[in-house]
Image (spheres, rainbow, N blue to C red):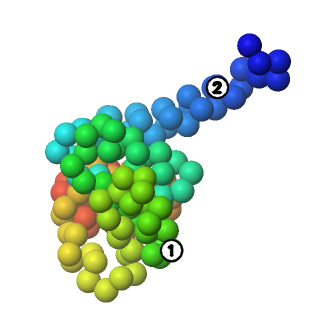
Amino acid sequence: MLQDATLEAPQQVTNTHQTVYSPLQRNGCGPGAKVGVVGVGGLGHLAVMFARAMGAEEVWAFMLDHSLDADARELGATGVIVMSDEGVQEQHRHTLFVPFFSLLPVFSCFGMLQNASV
């Protein structure tokens, strides 16, 4: 056993993973699901990877700009949606089943959900 190990480190990792996994699982992420992850940062990058591992058909990363497109795709995102891009809201309207919000504000993403449950 490591001399410097504490019980807090594994607990933090477990809590972080549970924070991401639980809402994905509870909201039906699995084979055939289309998932939107808002904010591909601290928790969001885990959400992209978990959604893919859970069998999601598509995982879309919602971001503020295109600076991290390659990173999001490397994590497993199908594509990147930047809400300020012209026409993107109409193009993706009512296309996502499972939202995962790791940052705010998210209100402009609501029109892309197929149902009203968030």
Q: Position of residue 35 (x, y in %)?
A: 29, 52
Residue at image point 40% right, 34% down: 22
- In the image, what residue type sits under mark 2? Pro
SS at mark 2 in the image: helix
Mark 2, other Cα within 10 Å: few <14 / some 14–19 / many ≥20: few
Residue lying at the far bottom in this picture: please name it.
Answer: 86
Residue lying at the far top in this picture: please name it.
Answer: 1
95 displayed left or right of 88: left
Circle number at residue 10: 2
Residue at image point 72% right, 20% down: 7
12 displayed left or right of 90: right
Relative to residue 9, is residue 33 depicted above or below? below
Q: Quadrant of residue 24?
A: top left
Q: Position of residue 5 (x, y in %)?
A: 77, 22
Q: Is residue 101 visible?
A: no
Residue at image point 32% right, 44% down: 52
SS at mark 1 in the image: loop
- In the image, what residue type sits under mark 1? Ser
Mark 1, other Cα within 10 Å: few <14 / some 14–19 / many ≥20: few
Residue behind mark 1: 67
Q: Return the disc, 1 or 2, that comes first in the chain's sequence.
A: 2
Residue at image point 48% right, 58% down: 40
40 displayed left or right of 6: left
Alpha-carbon span between mark 1 and mark 2: 32 Å
Q: Quadrant of residue 6?
A: top right
Relative to residue 89, is residue 17 depicted above or below? above
Q: Position of residue 49 (x, y in %)?
A: 40, 45
Name the front one of labels 1 and 2: 1
Q: Position of residue 93 (x, y in %)?
A: 20, 69
Q: Quadrant of residue 69?
A: bottom left
